[in-house]
Amino acid sequence: MNKKKHYLFLFSLLVTLGILLTGFSTTEAHAETKEKYIIGTDVTFAPFEFQDANNNFVGIDMDLLKAIAKDQGFEVEIKPLGFNAAVQALQANQVDGVIAGMSITNERKQSFDFSTPYFESGVVMAVSESNNDIKSYKDLKGKTVAIKTGTEGATFANSIKDKYGFNIATFDDSANMYEAVKAGSADAAFEDYPVMAYAITQNAPLKLVGEKEKGGQYGFAVNKGKNQELLTKFNNGLTNLKNDGTYQKITEKYLGEEKTEKQSIFALVKENYKQLLSGLGTTLFVTLISIAIASVLGIVFGLMSVTPSKTLRIISMIYVDIMRGIPMMVLAFFVFFTIPQLLGIKMIATVAAIIVLSLNAGAYIAELVRGGINAVDKGQLEAARSLGLPYSKAMGKIILPQAIKIMIPSFINQFVITLKDTTILSVIGLVELTQSGKIVVARTYDSNMWFVIAIIYIVVITALTKVSNLLERRATNG
C-alpha cells in the first residue's frame, strides 16, 4: 500500500510540475463577448511572425492582424503550427484562416480565398559570409541551394535551377536553412527579401549576393468558400490601417531594425528561460499523461496477447502491428488532420499529441507485458490452475507480480523514449521543448540554443531515470 502511495505521489508530483511549467505560457483569457477566429501561422518566419522573449506573438503579420481585429471588433487566437501544418490545418478546417507570409499564387487560389495583398516581397540570394566564390547565379553550377517550402524564394529557385544547373535542398524553416549554409551543407540560399534582410540584422552569418528579384504578394487566406465574413473584415481593416498610417508604422517597426550585437549563451538563456520552461512543462505534461494512458492500453492488449482466447490474441496482434508499423509523424498527421475532417470536429494539438503518443507507446508496452509474462516459468501457471485457481486469479496473484519486476527496466526505457518522441509532434504545432528552442532560434538566429536544449534534455531524462531506478530497486527488494 505504501509503495502504491509513493508511486501515486510521484506521478501526481510530476504531472503538477508539468502543469505548473506549462503555466509559464502567457496565453490570456478573453471574455467571450466578441467573435473569435482561430488563425494558423508559422512563428519561425521573422520579421513577419515570431515569438518574443515573453512568448508574445509579434512581427508584421501578427501586429497587422491584431490591429485589424481591434479595428473590426473581433478576437483572434493564434495557433503556431509551422507553414505546412498551418496550410493543412486550414484545409482540414482546424483553423479559420492563415497568415504566414503566404504568397498568393494561382495554384493556391484553387484551394483558398485570399485577401487583398498586404505586402509585396522580393527574392534574394545569400551565401556564407566567408564565401567569395559565388557572386552570381552562374557560379551555382553543381552547387546545392537551400530553400524553404512555400516561399517566393523556393518558387524562384525552382524556376531557374535547370538553367544554372544547381541542386535543391528543402527545409521547413528559415533558421535551419541558414544553418545549412553556415555549416557548408548548402552553398547558397534563396529567401524572401524582408526575411533574409532581417536574419542578417540578427547576426545570421550570411551576406547578400546579386540583385533583388521581383517577388510576389502576401495575402491572408481562408478555406475556399468559407469564412468570407472574416475575409471581408480583414480587407476592410487593412484599408483602414493604410489610411490612418498604422500599416506604415508597423512595417517600418520591423523592417527598419539595425544590426544587433550577438549575445552570450548566458544572456540567451536569461532572456528566454520562460519560453523554455513553458516548452519543458508541455513536454512533461504530454509525456506523463500519454505514458499513463499507454500503460493501460499496453496492459490490456498485453494480457490479451497471452490469453487462451485466439480472438483476443488476434485483436492484440492487429493493434500492435498497426501501431508499430505506422511512423509516428504519419500517425500525427492522420490524427490531427484526417480524423477531425472525418468527424467534423476541431482538435487542439495537445490532445492530438497525447492520442498519438498513447497509441504508439501502448503498442510497445503491450509487447513488454507479453514478454514479461512469457518470461515467467509456464509451470507456475499450470501449477496454480491444477490447484483449482481460475485463470484470472492465477494470472493476477502469481504471474503478474513476477512479470512486473521483469518489465520495469524496459518500462523505464519506454518512458524515456516517449519523452523524446514529443519532439516529433512539433509538426502538428505542439510547442514542446524542442519547438520552443526552434522558435527562439528563428528569432535570434543563435544556434547556441540547441546546446542549451540538449543540456535540458540530458538533465531532465537523467533525473527521471534515477528516480525510476530508485523505484525499481524498491519494487525488486520488496
Image (cartoon, rainbow, N blue to C red):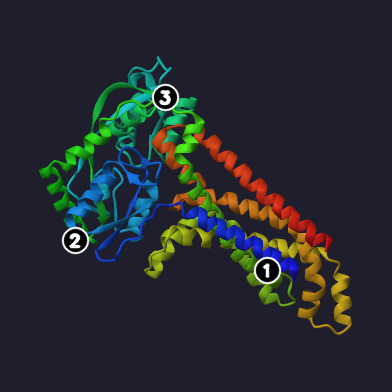
Judging by the rendered image, the residue that carries numbered circle 2 is: 229
* Residue 388 placement, left or right of 264: right
Relative to 34, residue 130 above or below: above
Q: Give the camera-side residue of 357 and 379.
A: 357
Task: Give the residue at x 25% y 50%.
Answer: 66
Does residue 447 appear in this view? no
| Residue under the point 63% across and 42% down | 458
Amino acid under disc 1: Ile
The amino acid type found where label 2 is placed reads Glu
Going by the numbered disc 3, the residue's amino acid type is Pro
Direction from residue 367 to residue 179 in the image, left or right: left
**Circle 2: element type:** helix
Which residue position is annotated with label 3? 205
Give the alpha-carbon distance from disc 2 to disc 3, as whole Å.
44 Å
Instruction: State the residue at coordinates (38%, 55%).
Output: 27
Asked which secondary structure carries label 1, the reply is helix
Distance, label 2 to label 1, CA atoms, is 50 Å
In the image, 409: left or right of 216? right
Q: Note whether 81 is above or below 370 in the view shown.
A: above
Disc 1 target residue: 299
Instruction: Using the rendered view, name the quadrant where residue 121 is placed.
Output: top left
Q: Residues within 10 Å of mark 3 (few under 14, many from 20)?
A: some
Which secondary structure, mark 3?
loop
Residue 158: image quadrant is top left
